[in-house]
Image (tube, rainbow, N blue to C red):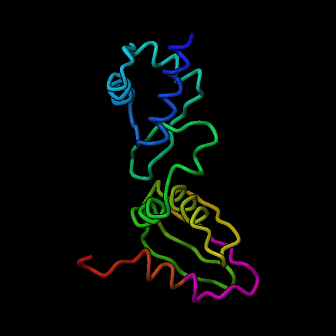
Amino acid sequence: MKDRDARLNNIKKIIRDKRIDCQEVLLEELHKEGHGVTQATLSRDLKALRVGKVSDGNKGYYYTLPGDTQFTATEKDYLQDVQRGFISYDFSHNTCVVNTQPGHANSVALAIDQINIHEILGTIAGDDTVFLVLKEGADRANVHAFFKGRIIKPKGE
């Protein structure tokens, strides 16, 4: 049982420290750590740990532990998620509509939520559109500056 506990702890550490996208890569990492585990045992371990997969916002997925999804990405990763899917944006009163590539709205909305832009109260995502609700009296210029300064890059950058 002690060996199993050590293996489970290593699986958690590897998943937290690296972006693992498939069992084969995780199996290789475990072998490097000295765990001679089979794919079937690894599969049972992942189930026991309740490991899931989340979208990387670019047609790929990676493993995550329960409760870790909010902490696995840095602000740079979130900005890249927005940049990958972003097409355009426009304001109307205290709302902003962000147009995205098809299928990217959820990752863009999550990224905007996680970046925590003070003026944005919340997001609602469709397939290729994110609806931003701005706080009462929010300064649109700050939201505009976010998009112009951190998302829309001049050509050649």
Image position of 34 (left or right of 136): left
Going 47% across and 19% down the picture, which residue do you hit?
43
Going 55% across and 13% down the picture, which residue do you hit?
2
Between 124 and 23, the residue placed more toward the observer is: 23
Residue 97: give x, y in percent of width and height.
57, 74
Residue 129: give x, y in percent of width and height.
54, 65
In the rendered view, would you say 146 is above or below 14? Answer: below
Magenta residue span: 131-143
In the rendered view, would you say 2 is above or below 88? Answer: above
Image position of 141 (left or right of 77): right
Between 38 and 155, the residue placed more toward the observer is: 38
Indicate the quadrant containing the C terminus: top left, top right, bottom left or bottom right.
bottom left
Image position of 84 (left or right of 141): left
Residue, far left: 156
In the rendered view, would you say 76 is above or below 26? Answer: below
Between 146 and 127, the residue placed more toward the observer is: 146
**Does residue 132 belong to the magenta stretch?**
yes
Quarter of the rendering containing residue 121:
bottom right
